[in-house]
Amino acid sequence: MSGRSASRRWVVHALLFLPIPIVLVLVTTRRYSIPTPVMENTVMTGDHVLVSLLHYGMRVGSTRLPGFDGPKVDDLMVFNFPKGDTVVIGYPNPDYYQWSRMGSRDRILRELVIDLPRPGTTETSPVRIEGIETHGISEREPRLARCIAGPGDTLLIKAGTVHLNGQFHPAPEMVKFDYEVELNGALGLAIMRERFGIDEATYQSHEHHGTLPLRPAQEEAFRSLKQVLSLERQHDTLGLYHSGDGMFWPIFPNDSSFKWTTDELGPLWIPKAGATIQLDARNLTLYGRAISAYEGHAVSRVGDQVLIDGQPANIYTFRQDYYWAMGDNRHRSQDSRYYGFVPFDHVIGKVIATY
């Protein structure tokens, strides 16, 4: 018997001696730690979340058992990273596809190195990556974010503000945006931490000019500080990044024909199971990955003709629901604005407690 099999058998035996309510909690929930500031101040870096596997239906292998309901707008949900199907070993961020847009697969394998710390020193040494590997859905990194839009919704982000189906959608209470600030003197760390929840590592500064995250409700209080000369909310106006002598498009749909940004995106329709779309060059750019990577079809294009599994197609009917996820720390969150739709088969569960 393998060590893993023996371990699983031990767990099963242990569960038999526990009270039924405790067994149910252990089987139907899962705990995750949060290593990034994606949801600050709603969920802080280092916090743990307890996730219900029952709300949306437990996944058992490739089967999902019936749940109470699917994710709803404003739910906090945990899901497997959609673009985690292909991974640069030891270098998950940025994801493999972003690396590919900055170069080729061969270049990644040939040139990419990671600066690892030397034991006992503050110095680092370049270490070549170990390669590229593929992961099944359950092996992909778990992510936490808020469900912003669900299947059949039309999403628009304008100047950082979310609109759903043509209507303004209020931001979560703890939502934060980055602000560009100019100072005429130093701000004490106590003021930053106690009044505005900003630590020294979070404030990105160059002399008296820097970037910091604030809740909109804090804006006027911060602006009134005597050291503050100017304060302006960050507004990303073009969805391309420069990389050396080239450029790449990290914002969904990761294509130069869409100049969407973290603050200006859409309108975008979220796919719904059973719904049919027209297939053309624009829609293929938006939905091609969902059709191929998440629904298992070979997708290609010859001139203006779209081919699915080698056959001409001008329509497509989706097989599953999709969601749009965003962090409450809006300018410091790698979320659907970068990787696109979250398929329902990637959803793990709903956050029911934070501690």
Image (cartoon, grey):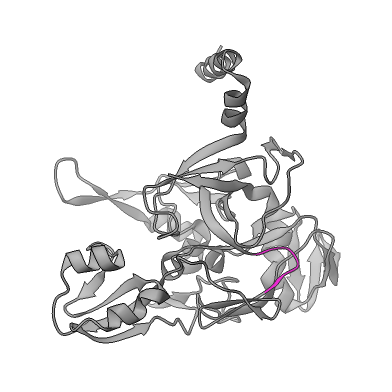
Give coordinates of residue 181: x percent, y percent: 28, 81
Magenta segment: 149-154
Q: Nearer the viewer, residue 131 or 220?
A: 220
Q: Nearer the viewer, residue 37 or 335?
A: 37
- Taking 34 as reference, is 251 above or below it? below
Locate residue 33 relative to residue 343 in the image: left or right: left
Q: Nearer the viewer, residue 114 or 28?
A: 28
Magenta-drawn stretch, dominant element (helix, strand or loop): loop
Q: Nearer the viewer, residue 89 or 237?
A: 237
Give coordinates of residue 172: x percent, y percent: 52, 67
What residue sits 36% from the left and 72% below the top? Answer: 214
Residue furthest to the bottom in view is 229
What residue sits 43% from the left and 56% below the top? Answer: 93
Residue 300 seen from this side: yes
Locate residue 344 relative to residue 173 in the image: left or right: right
Q: Using the rendered view, name the quadrant where residue 241 is placed.
A: bottom left
Give coordinates of residue 191: x percent, y percent: 20, 68
Q: Using the rendered view, name the quadrant where residue 211 is placed.
A: bottom left
Numbered circles on residues, count: 0
Position of the N terminus, as image quadrant, is top right
What residue sits 41% from the left and 51% below the top? Answer: 91
Is 52 magenta? The answer is no
Position of the C terminus, as image quadrant, is top left
Residue 136 seen from this side: no
Give coordinates of residue 150: x percent, y percent: 69, 63
- Taking 133 as reference, is 170 above or below it? below
